[in-house]
Image (spheres, rainbow, N blue to C red):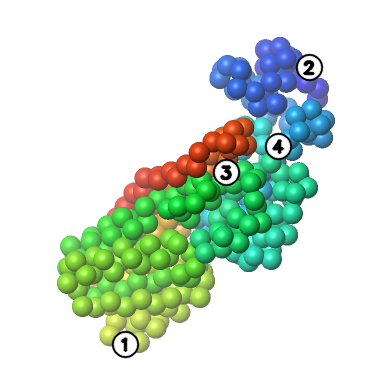
Amino acid sequence: MSIQKIAQLAGVSVATVSRVLNNSDTVKAKNRERVLSAIKESNYQPNLLARQLRTARSYMILVMVSNIANPFCAEVVKGIEEEAEKNGYRILLCNSGSDIERSRSGLSLLSGKIVDGIITMDAFTKLPELSALIGAAPWVQCAEYADAGAVSCVGINDVDASQHVVSQLADSGRKRIALINHDLSYKYARLRERGYKSVLHLRELDYQVVEYARDLSSAAGMAAMQKLLADNPPDAVFAVSDTLAAGALRAIEQAGLRVPQDIAVVGFDGTELADMISLTTIEQPSRDIGRKAVDLLLNKIDNPDAPTERIMMDWRFISRASS
């Protein structure tokens, strides 16, 4: 399939197709959509090497994910990929596990000009080390909100969201609200715990118990819930991810207790899993977070001197049978 054939299918000139392939902003929106539809329909693969030689760009983005097995991370990556492809880019995915050595290996692609920029979802505490490795290259931190520094970022207000959850549980009469948290090297974990504790203090609730899961799996959530049940069990549990909450539900069921009559359970992220198990949760706009991260990154690629941007996305509380 040639560029001439794409132009014929789209009903536009060869020059318009070329401008779309080179991500020019001079193309009318309707013509861009026609060209992209024709490319998708014909499965056209542009000569990326030739385009790189013409533009001094690779049209590749490195995406470093802390845990691709986390359904929330997977949804964010889908949003990143959709927006990247819409703008003529492809992504390279690195499952870093927030390990700095694995990150170092992936970041070598920057110095080799194999990628034009990077989106990270690593732990907030790793940012200083990442910053030293990334240098002045275009970079956006995704889903781990940074209050200061030179890196642009996009996420939600984790404190407000967790405060809303705990307030809802307290308003429903729950007095012993526990938290299942994760690794405090992640800023979201610290912020959600801060929101949890602030409401307990405001409501003068004496019961304050935090159990830290070893990872974000259902099995880890189940193990954490079993510890909570062993001594002075709670009447409500707030877990910082839907997968942890799913494990908590299994532990409660195995203990012969009822949800929500005996123990209410609330998760976080708003993944498909939460809908499947009728879990009350905080829904993050995961794909929109990914799309916005790409927008910020492409702006930085096109305008290296663009100011740092920090974007807060909206979240939504979804009440279901578990609470």
The reply to whether residue 182 is in sight is yes
Which badge, 3 or 4, comes first in the chain's sequence?
4
Name the residue that disc number 3 marks: 80
Considering every residue shown, the one lying at the far bottom of the view is 231
Name the residue that disc number 2 marks: 4
Which amino acid type corresponds to the residue marked 3 in the rendered image?
Ile
Residue 131, compared with residue 238, is above or below; it is above
Q: Are marks 3 and 2 in contact (CB under 8 Å)?
A: no
Where does residue 21 sit, x and y in percent of width and height? 70, 26
For label 2, the SS is helix
For label 4, the SS is loop
Where does residue 121 sit, x and y in percent of width and height? 55, 55
Name the residue that disc number 4 marks: 59
Q: CA distance from mark 3 to mark 4?
A: 14 Å
Which badge, 3 or 2, comes first in the chain's sequence?
2
Mark 1 crowdedness (10 Å alpha carbons): few <14, some 14-19, many ≥20 = few
> Horizontal placement of 148 versus 111: left or right?
left
Which amino acid type corresponds to the residue marked 1 in the rendered image?
Asp
Name the residue that disc number 1 marks: 231
Q: Nearer the viewer, residue 254 or 298?
A: 298
Looking at the rendered image, the quarter that the C terminus falls into is bottom left
